[in-house]
Amino acid sequence: MATATANAPAKRLVVDPVTRIEGHLRIEVATDDKGAITEAYSSGTMVRGIEIILRGRDPRDAWAFAQRICGVCTLVHGMASIRAVEDALKYPIPPNAHLIRNLMIAAQYVHDHVMHFYHLHALDWVDVVSALKADPRATADLAQSLSTYDRSSPGHFSDVQRKVKALVESGQLGIFANAYWGHPAYKLPPEANLMAVAHYLDALAWQREVVKLHAVFGGKNPHPNFVVGGVPAAFSGGAQGSGATSFNDVGLQQVKTVIEQMQRFVDLVYLPDTLAIAGFYKDWFARGEGLGNFLCVGEFPDGTGRLGLPRGAILNRDLSRIHPVDLYDPAQIQEFVSHAWYDYSGSKTVGLHPFRGKTKLAYNGSKPPYDLLDVEREYSWLKAPRWRGLPMEVGPLARVLLLYAAGHEPTRTLAQAALRKLDLPLTAMFSTLGRTAARTLETKIIVDMMAGWYEQLVANLRQGDLRLFNDQYWNPRTWPSSCEGVGFMEAPRGALTHWVVIRDGRLDNYQAVVPSTWNAGPRDPAGQPGAYEAALMDRHVLAVRDQPLEILRTVHSFDPCLACAVHMVNPDGTPGVTVRVT
Ligand code: NFE
Ligand code: MG
């Protein structure tokens, strides 16, 4: 083993790379004699520099570069980017453009959250190998007791079991390789495991269908097209002219079908599965909380200043008070680099508001600058964003808590029904499984909003309001010589902001402050940990020291995306999954 750095504690456990995420995440934890986690460190180990390559470009082109920050939250950086430019230039956009954007954003949530639950997170709770022992008839009884989903027959579950058996017997587990099958922390009975595996496979086929909504309005998925000033598609009516630049009645009908497919899967599969699986792991509603501070920037604007998902901050779990958040106030949002490989002209204590933000690398070598992380100094390619100096959790749990605190009736009803079913108090939401359950609840809340926007859009088009774009944006001579704007959005993983400074028609500065930067970021100058770090430092005791399933559960509950968070790789690559015990 290579040498540990001088500051490294004696007992460090390294998980690198964390898999079933997007991007490159390394977790190091320190444990005491009993194996309980006492310290945790989260490190983004990859760097790309999109903020740097945007400088000097036409602001109207920025979205297409920014959108390539990530292929999972495939539209969010494009959206935040055009909103930033629109905020700087301040021309309105037509109501239909808001409606279409809302539908595209909502479709992204539903798609991304279902994919996270089944394809990225479920295998932390579901033992695929145990599914081989299930009785298909008992599995059908279980599935039919939970919902009226039609793929719940004994014959279907026996087919799925045969498929999994063939995989296991071939010795090539493929998509199910590299997990801790048989780990003692798996608690589901074989039938629940088999049902979940069947739904894992169904969700793969389902997602292929539902991405079509993006293709109707944005030409393709991933990375649908956008445009500053509206949406880049005209309505051509009839059955003609559907494609990258226009949509028609056939496309609208397809959107309606997708909304119905989404609704059905959420109601009949995702929501009941979440509650059923959570019921076997109730102890995970009391672990992995972390910060207790939550931030939302808001989403689903309607053009009149109202938001479908509110903006605000909740501090110390106090749901009786929503603190207002002002993105323009230089004292509120700041990014710190005390523990990150960035250079703020030598200062490691100052925080920069993103309009004045800097992206300058403090390390440019060809090898990773660590063996074990030097946690007293710099240990991540993520900056540490703070709100009024405080570390904040962002994401589904933050949004559900904000909606709850704001008195949003559908959220209160749904959350109370779920907690009643699980026989848990509201405070159970402040936990690893609370975060996972919140993601499911918000998917239900958002999918229920979609039909309303769709109907409004169709009504507007039928009444002859075909405006989808404001061409004022396309005459740079009318632009002020200097302006600034922030594009906010609630991406699936949380609060996302893009910040532009425009001078003489070009981008003078571009900063992205991203959900996984908030959640996965390192310590700040005051030594306060980021959200993953805080959530892991709850004295978890690992049942099997070199199979840290418990770490994966908590980290995955945030749905990490490090590609987004660093938006900047170790040129020499990294080996496969390593769990290192020192
Ligand atoms: Ni790459 Fe992303 C989302 C954004 S996460 S997935 O959601 O923005 O940081
Ligand atoms: Mg950034």
Image: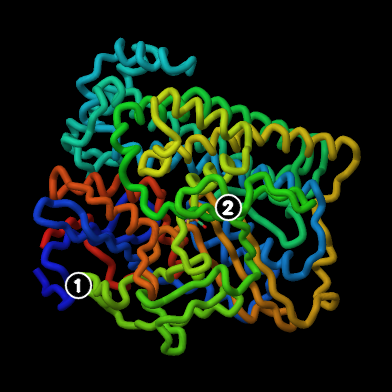
Furthest residue in direction right, as rendered: 464
Residue identified by numbered label 1: 371
Q: Secondary structure at mark 1?
A: loop
Cα distance between the residues tagged 1 and 2: 36 Å
**Residue at the (19%, 57%) spot, across then down:** 578
Which numbered disc, 1 or 2, marks the residue that appears first in the sequence? 1
Q: Position of residue 221 (x, y in %)?
A: 57, 48
Q: How is the image coloured?
A: rainbow
Q: Amino acid at mark 1?
A: Asp
Mark 1 or mark 2, which is nearer to you? 2
**Residue wearing tag 2:** 490
Instruction: Using the image, determine if residue 104 lies above or below residue 83.
Output: above
| Residue 230 relative to residue 392: left or right | right
- Say which residue appears at 80% left-offset and 67% top-offset: 473
Compared with 333, 296 (above or below) is above
Picture coordinates of residue 144 (x, y %)? 41, 13
Q: Is residue 321 above or below residue 326?
A: above
Q: Position of residue 14 (x, y in %)?
A: 20, 60
